[in-house]
């Protein structure tokens, strides 16, 4: 993945800032990757924590797939309220280009609603939530786990921010396998034991 150095953080209003926090901070600060934001329009997106994020790219204008290493999609309060067909089309383009997609919490519901989880093993906040979506056909592939990685798609439930980042780091190879495992152990179990 090192020859592609851009990571996109796909933002909506009321996005969950903590869910992608570990992943984007480490990748942006301690590796060769650069995190950029992308959304449906250029207006700043306010997180649930009140952080106002500027938008670097608009999905309809993005053409830089040859540099794109991954799209990270945090959860948020707007995923259940909106269909986001334009965002789904953008993700479809990325999937066709074999770009890994990492979604957590409500963003997994977005992937579910648009058929991205019908052919890959996946997880999310609950199977029942997925089953409440009329176009969901992936019940047999649902795994009750913190994080599932399959077919270029990482899915995680709302309590899995550390493991979500860990799986992202593994795919992106942000450091040696040993250093990534050490980071995970520290943040999963604590620095002082």
Image (cartoon, rainbow, N blue to C red):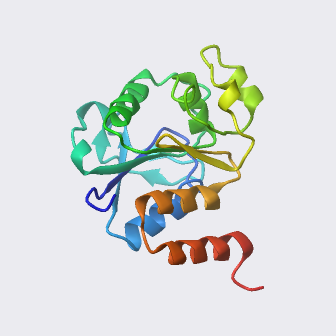
Q: Is the residue 79 above or below the residue 172 in the image?
A: above
Q: Is residue 143 left or right of residue 150?
A: right
Q: Is the residue 113 above or below the residue 33 in the image?
A: above
Q: Residue at x 59, y 40 (%)?
A: 76
Q: Residue at x 59, y 25 (%)?
A: 81
Farthest residue toward the top? Answer: 134
Quadrant of the drawing holding the C terminus: bottom right
Locate residue 175, reporting x and y percent: 43, 73
Farthest residue toward the bottom? Answer: 192
Locate residue 66, reporting x and y percent: 22, 46
Locate residue 24, reporting x and y percent: 46, 60
Q: Residue at x 43, y 21 (%)?
A: 85
Q: Is the residue 34 above or below the residue 44 in the image?
A: below
Q: Is residue 46 left or right of residue 70?
A: right
Residue toward you, 77 or 171:
171
Residue toward you, 108 or 144:
144
Q: Residue at x 46, y 52 (%)?
A: 52
Q: Is residue 89 left or right of residue 160?
A: left
Q: Is residue 77 visible?
A: no
Locate residue 149, reporting x and y percent: 56, 47
């Amino acid at each position: 993945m090192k020859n592609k150095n851009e990571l996109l953080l796909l933002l909506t209003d009321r996005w969950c800032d903590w869910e992608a926090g570990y992943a984007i901070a480490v990748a942006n600060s301690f590796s060769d990757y650069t995190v950029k934001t992308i959304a449906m329009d250029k207006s700043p997106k306010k997180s649930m924590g009140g952080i106002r994020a500027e938008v670097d790219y608009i999905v309809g204008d993005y053409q830089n797939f040859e540099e794109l290493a991954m799209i990270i999609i945090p959860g948020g309060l707007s995923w259940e309220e909106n269909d986001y067909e334009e965002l789904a089309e953008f993700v479809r383009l990325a999937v066709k280009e074999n770009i890994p997609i990492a979604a957590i919490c409500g963003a997994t519901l977005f992937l579910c609603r648009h058929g991205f989880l019908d052919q890959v093993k996946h997880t999310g906040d609950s199977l029942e939530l997925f089953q409440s979506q009329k176009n969901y056909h992936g019940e047999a592939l649902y795994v009750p786990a913190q994080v599932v990685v399959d077919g270029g798609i990482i899915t995680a439930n709302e309590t899995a921010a550390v493991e979500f980042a860990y799986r992202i780091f593994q795919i992106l190879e942000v450091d040696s396998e040993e250093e990534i495992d050490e980071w995970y152990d520290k943040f999963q179990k604590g620095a002082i034991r």
